[in-house]
C-alpha cells in the first residue's frame, strides 16, 4: 500500500470517528493517535499507551475492518508503536543529587502501621477489591492500572491503600512509592509555588514507581490543581508506573474534567460495599481480640446488628467497651453494650410490614413457595418455615391473633400462638435460627 494512500485512508477513518463519537471521547481516545509513514504493508500508528490501542481495537473493530486491508486471520493490518515518554529530567541531572536528601525528608511516606493486608477482614462486600489491591501490590504497573477504589466512609479504602504501600516497601525495596491524600498533594503544590520549587516537585512525583492517592473527591472545583494532577497521572501511566486512587464516588459521579475522568476509568474501577452481618461480627471479634477484650458471640451479633454502616464505628465501639470494662473490671454483656453504645446504634426507618411481605421474605430465606406456607402440608421443610412466618407476624404486626392466623390459609389463633411459643423458645439456644430470623427482618426493612 502506498504511504500517501494509507495516510489518506487514516484521515478518512479519523473524520468518520469524529462524526460518530462525542467530543470528549474523540479528544481522549482518537486524537492522541498519530499516523506514522512506513514502507511496510501494515498501517503504522503511534499511540501514547496501550490503553488507547486497546480502546481503538475494542470499540471500532468493525470500522477498522471496513477501512483497512486484513491479514489471514481477518484482523486489520495495523501495527502499533508506543510513544516514548519525554525525558526532560536528564538535563538537570547534576541538581538532583544535591536535592535528593531534602526531597526525601519533604516527601517521606507516612503509612498507618495497623493498615496491612493481614489486618484487613475479608467478606463478600470487599473480597473483589482486596484481591485487586493484592494483585497491584504483587505486580505493580502490570495488573490493574490505574486501580480506582470507591465506596462510603469508613469501609476500608484507606486501609487497602496503606496495605499496598506496606507490602511494596517490604517486598520491593528498590521501588519508589508514595502514599498521600489529595489535600497533601494540593499543599505540596502550593508550597512549591511559594518556594519556586515546582520543578523539584514534578521530578519527585513523576519519578515514582507507585503513587497511592486517597480521597480524590477533594480535587473537585480546583481546576489548576486538577490540571497538575492529571499531568502527573498521565506521565506515570505512560511509563507503566502504578497509580491507585480512592474516592467516595465512582469516577463518573465526580465533578472533574472529562479528560481526568476518562483517564481514571482506563483501568479497573472497583466498589467496596458495606460489610454484611457475619463480616461485621468477624471485624468486631478481631478488633476485640487485639485489645484483649472477650466478647460473647451473641453480644457480638447484637452489636453488629445495630452498627452496620461503618467499620470505623465498629472500631470505636470496641475502644469504648474496652475502656469501660477495663475501668470497672467487668465482663462484656448485652446490658453493658446497651448502656455504653446506645448512642452509636443505627436504626433503619420501619416500613409497614404485612403478612404477605413476611411470607415472601420467609419463602426466600427457606427456599419454599408462598402458597405452600399458606397451605396445610405438614412436611417438615414447609411446616417449620410456616411457624417462623407466624412468629414474625405476631412480633411485627399489631393485629389480633385471629386476624393474623386467618391470613395463613385459615389457621386458628391457637395454631399461631403455638408456633410463636415454639420459635421463641428455640431462639434461646439455636444461633442459626436467630441469624435466619434476623436476616429475614433485614429483608423486610430493605
Image (cartoon, rainbow, N blue to C red):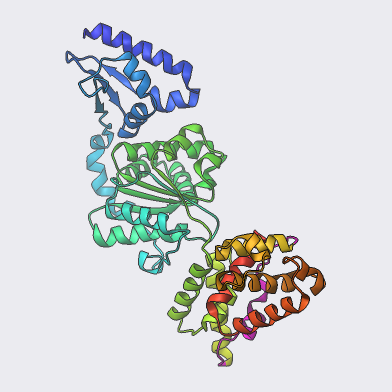
Q: Residue at (58%, 66%) from the top-left corner? A: 308
State which quadrant residue 206 falls in: top left
Indicate whether 414 appears above or below 184: below
Counting the numbered discs, the total is 0
Q: Where in the figure is residue 353, as x and y percent of width and height?
A: 73, 63
**Side of 329 where 203 appears, left or right:** left
Of residue 175 and residue 187, the one placed in the foreground of this image is 175
Q: Which residue range is magenta in the image? A: 329-352
Q: Where in the figure is residue 115, as x and y percent of width and height?
A: 41, 65
State which quadrant residue 378 falls in: bottom right
Give the farthest residue toward the left: 39
Q: Residue at (26%, 45%) from the top-left corner? A: 96
Q: Is residue 107 visible?
A: no
State which quadrant residue 159 falls in: bottom left
Q: Where in the figure is residue 355, as x and y percent of width and height?
A: 73, 64
Q: State which quarter of the image contains the C terminus.
A: bottom right
Q: Residue at (27%, 7%) from the top-left corner? A: 5
**Side of 381 where 139 appears, left or right:** left
**Side of 388 where 166 appears, left or right:** left
Of residue 121 and residue 353, the one placed in the foreground of this image is 353
Q: Is residue 414 visible?
A: yes
Amino acid at each position: 500500500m502506498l504511504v500517501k494512500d494509507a495516510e489518506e485512508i487514516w484521515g478518512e477513518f479519523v473524520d468518520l470517528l469524529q462524526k460518530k463519537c462525542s467530543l470528549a471521547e474523540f479528544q481522549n481516545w482518537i486524537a492522541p493517535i498519530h499516523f506514522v509513514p512506513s514502507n511496510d504493508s501494515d498501517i503504522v500508528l503511534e499511540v501514547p499507551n496501550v490503553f488507547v490501542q486497546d480502546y481503538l481495537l475494542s470499540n471500532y473493530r468493525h470500522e477498522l475492518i471496513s477501512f483497512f486491508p486484513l491479514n489471514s486471520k481477518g484482523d486489520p493490518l495495523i501495527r502499533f508503536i508506543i510513544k516514548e515518554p519525554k525525558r526532560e529530567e536528564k538535563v538537570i541531572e547534576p541538581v538532583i543529587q544535591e536535592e535528593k536528601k531534602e526531597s526525601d525528608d519533604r516527601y517521606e511516606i507516612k503509612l498507618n502501621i495497623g493498615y496491612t493486608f493481614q489486618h484487613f477482614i475479608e467478606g463478600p462486600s470487599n473480597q473483589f477489591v482486596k484481591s485487586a489491591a493484592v494483585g497491584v501490590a504483587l505486580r505493580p504497573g502490570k495488573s490493574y492500572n490505574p486501580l480506582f477504589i470507591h465506596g462510603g466512609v469508613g469501609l476500608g479504602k484507606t486501609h487497602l491503600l496503606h496495605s499496598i504501600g506496606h507490602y511494596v516497601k517490604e517486598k520491593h525495596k528498590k521501588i519508589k512509592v508514595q502514599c498521600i491524600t489529595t489535600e497533601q498533594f494540593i499543599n505540596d503544590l502550593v508550597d512549591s509555588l511559594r518556594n519556586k520549587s515546582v520543578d523539584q516537585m514534578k521530578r519527585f512525583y513523576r519519578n515514582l514507581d507507585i503513587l497511592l492517592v486517597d480521597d480524590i473527591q477533594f480535587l473537585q472545583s480546583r481546576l489548576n490543581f486538577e490540571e497538575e494532577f492529571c499531568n502527573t497521572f498521565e506521565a506515570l501511566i505512560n511509563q507503566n508506573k502504578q497509580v491507585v486512587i480512592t474516592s467516595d464516588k465512582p469516577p463518573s459521579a465526580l465533578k472533574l474534567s472529562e479528560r481526568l475522568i476518562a483517564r481514571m476509568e482506563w483501568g479497573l474501577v472497583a466498589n467496596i460495599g458495606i460489610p454484611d452481618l457475619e463480616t461485621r461480627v468477624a471485624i468486631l471479634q478481631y478488633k476485640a481480640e487485639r485489645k484483649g477484650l472477650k466478647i460473647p458471640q451473641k453480644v457480638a451479633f447484637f452489636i453488629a446488628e445495630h452498627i452496620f454502616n461503618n467499620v470505623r464505628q465498629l472500631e470505636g465501639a470496641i475502644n469504648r467497651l474496652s475502656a469501660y470494662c477495663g475501668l470497672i473490671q467487668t465482663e462484656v454483656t448485652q446490658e453493658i453494650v446497651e448502656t455504653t453504645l446506645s448512642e452509636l446504634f443505627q436504626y433503619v426507618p420501619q416500613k409497614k410490614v404485612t403478612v404477605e411481605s413476611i411470607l415472601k421474605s420467609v419463602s426466600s430465606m427457606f427456599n419454599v413457595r408462598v402458597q405452600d406456607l399458606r397451605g396445610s402440608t405438614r412436611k417438615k421443610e414447609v411446616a417449620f418455615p410456616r411457624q417462623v412466618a407466624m412468629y414474625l407476624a405476631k412480633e411485627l404486626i399489631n393485629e389480633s391473633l385471629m386476624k393474623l392466623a386467618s391470613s395463613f390459609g385459615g389457621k386458628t389463633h391457637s395454631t399461631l400462638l403455638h408456633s410463636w411459643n415454639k420459635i421463641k423458645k428455640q431462639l434461646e439456644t439455636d444461633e442459626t435460627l436467630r441469624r435466619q430470623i434476623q436476616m429475614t427482618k433485614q429483608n423486610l426493612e430493605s
